[in-house]
Image (cartoon, coloured by chain):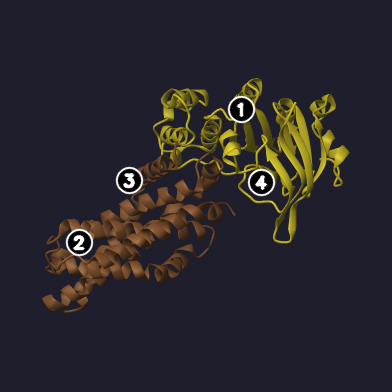
Chain colours: A brown, B yellow
């Protein structure tokens, strides 16, 4: 079994647990919807102003919701010392971290789909002007957020203030990714042309942090 | 017989506290060694170090000729720690299916069904583990540990929460594993069961190895003998 199949089996197991408990999906989904609703009531924005802030509002909302998702990733392995059972097995530490990132990314994409739907209604915006481009940004940016979240989720697994520490550590690292995804989302919501520079930023970010996750997983999880 | 486990002058610290002190031990392949000692003696630490879950600071360790945590060692190890290592929100079958896939178990479905039967959980196989009693969970944990027919078992207090019938079942599982040539290292406080199953015993006190050798008839007849003879703190 290669490392990718191992990662997929971890992701399948985590998704099966999540579908049964819905603890990440319910909390992150509810959080994202509530934030979007509160902002829609808090500010009386013109259609132009709404378009200007859309990308920022959505991606901050997604990144905070993401923290709720990947906080649960490794926390799920703590009861009954399941992490020890996995680490003492032939599964590689890298496949464990990547498997957690895949689960978090799929769950966060569901939260993003719900949020776009809510956003379209409450902000009176058509977000389907360039649906495939928007989907590509969501996939690349979500992967970046989740791979960093999973690495630092593994690093903070034994901290008592894990829920607090994880966002504090990861958000400064996410700044380049958030800038790129905010800029691209604004372009697509206002039906402007694709900007390849921001796409390159997203891709480089994803590749660098995925490689770091694979390289550092063993040190983080075992030592 | 070649050594399945070999420790040479191993020291393991938690901060400044030495949990294992100058630990030298060889366990032959195919033997069944009971690790005995009071609470805090270092039994769990020893098993975790051998399973590659906890780094050590000094000395050298070989597990089946490889370093602990090497992929060769991990492929050969079946580890059961203090925690049972199964997911509460999955059913017994889902748990074993997942571990069978992760451990590359051949004939996955048949093996999982056979183990569910063997640990007497087949009739509750589709109920989430959350609803199991402690004994049922421990039996599932045993099935998980034995699933891939490992060559080396590292079992931390495997008799915990088991009733008489389940203890007998575990004894049979361990004897079967020994018959097929597996090496077993287990810690326990249940001296009588330990002496009946073990071929060798190792006694730890405050991180130091006090005695290691074959289990003798005297130990079998009087399980407290070992503590009286070899510990500074005296008998039971």
Q: Are marks 4 and 1 on the same chain?
A: yes
Q: CA distance from mark 4 to mark 1?
A: 24 Å
Rendered image quadrant of residue B213: top right
Residue A64 appears at what percent x and percent y? Answer: 34, 66
- Judge left or right: residue B82 versus residue A145: right
Q: Residue at x 32, y 68 (%)?
A: A178
What is the crowding at mark 3: few (fewer than 14 residues within 10 Å), some, or many (at least 20)? few
Secondary structure under tag 3 reads: helix
Residue B121: assigned label = none
- Chain letter for the residue marked with disc 1 in the picture: B
Residue at mark 2 shares a chain with residue at mark 3: yes
Residue at image coords 45%, 27%: B112
Determine whether label 3 and label 1 are within 8 Å by CB. no
Circle 2/circle 3 CB separation < 8 Å: no
The residue identified by callout 4 is B49
Residue A162, placed above or below residue B89: below
Q: Choose the circle earlier in sequence order: 4 or 1.
A: 4
Chain hosting mark 4: B
Give the residue number, with chain letter if any, for mark 1: B170
Q: Residues under labels 1 and 2: Cα distance? A: 54 Å
């Amino acid at each position: 079994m290669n490392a990718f199949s191992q990662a997929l089996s971890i992701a399948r197991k985590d998704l099966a647990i999540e579908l049964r408990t819905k603890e990440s999906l319910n909390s992150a989904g509810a959080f994202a919807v509530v934030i979007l609703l509160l902002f829609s009531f808090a500010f009386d924005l013109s259609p132009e102003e709404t378009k200007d802030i859309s990308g920022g509002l959505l991606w901050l909302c997604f990144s905070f919701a993401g923290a709720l998702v990947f906080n649960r990733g490794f926390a799920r392995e703590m009861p009954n010392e399941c992490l020890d059972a996995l680490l003492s097995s032939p599964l590689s530490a890298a496949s464990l971290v990547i498997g957690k990132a895949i689960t978090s990314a799929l769950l966060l994409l569901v939260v993003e789909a719900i949020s776009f739907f809510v956003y379209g209604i409450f902000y009176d915006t058509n977000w389907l002007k360039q649906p495939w481009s928007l989907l590509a940004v969501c996939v690349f940016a979500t992967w970046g957020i989740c791979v960093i979240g999973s690495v630092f989720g593994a690093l903070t697994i034994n901290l008592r203030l894990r829920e607090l520490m994880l966002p504090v550590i990861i958000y400064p690292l996410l700044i380049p990714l958030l800038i790129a995804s905010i800029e691209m989302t604004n372009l697509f919501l206002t039906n402007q042309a694709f900007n390849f520079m921001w796409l390159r930023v997203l891709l480089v970010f994803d590749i660098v942090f995925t490689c770091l996750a694979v390289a550092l997983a063993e040190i983080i999880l075992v030592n | 017989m070649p050594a399945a486990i070999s420790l040479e002058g191993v020291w393991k610290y938690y901060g400044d506290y030495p949990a294992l002190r100058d630990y030298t031990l060889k366990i032959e392949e195919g033997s069944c060694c009971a690790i005995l000692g009071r609470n805090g003696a270092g039994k769990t630490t020893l098993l975790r170090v051998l399973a590659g879950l906890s780094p050590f600071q000094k000395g050298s360790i070989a597990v089946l000729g490889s370093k602990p945590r090497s992929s060769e060692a991990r492929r050969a190890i079946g580890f059961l720690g203090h925690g049972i290592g199964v997911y509460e929100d999955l059913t017994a079958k889902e748990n074993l299916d997942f571990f069978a896939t992760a451990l590359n178990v051949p004939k996955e479905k048949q093996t999982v069904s056979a183990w569910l039967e063997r640990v007497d959980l087949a009739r509750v196989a589709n109920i989430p583990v959350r609803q199991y009693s402690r004994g049922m969970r421990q039996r599932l944990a045993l099935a998980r540990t034995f699933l891939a027919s490992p060559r080396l078992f590292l079992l931390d207090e495997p008799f915990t929460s088991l009733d008489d019938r389940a203890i007998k079942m575990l004894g049979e599982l361990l004897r079967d594993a020994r018959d097929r040539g597996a090496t077993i290292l287990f810690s326990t406080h249940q001296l009588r069961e330990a002496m009946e199953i073990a071929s060798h015993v190792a006694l730890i006190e405050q991180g130091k190895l006090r005695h290691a050798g074959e289990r003798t008839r005297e130990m079998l007849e009087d399980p407290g003998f070992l503590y009286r003879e070899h510990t500074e703190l005296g008998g039971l």
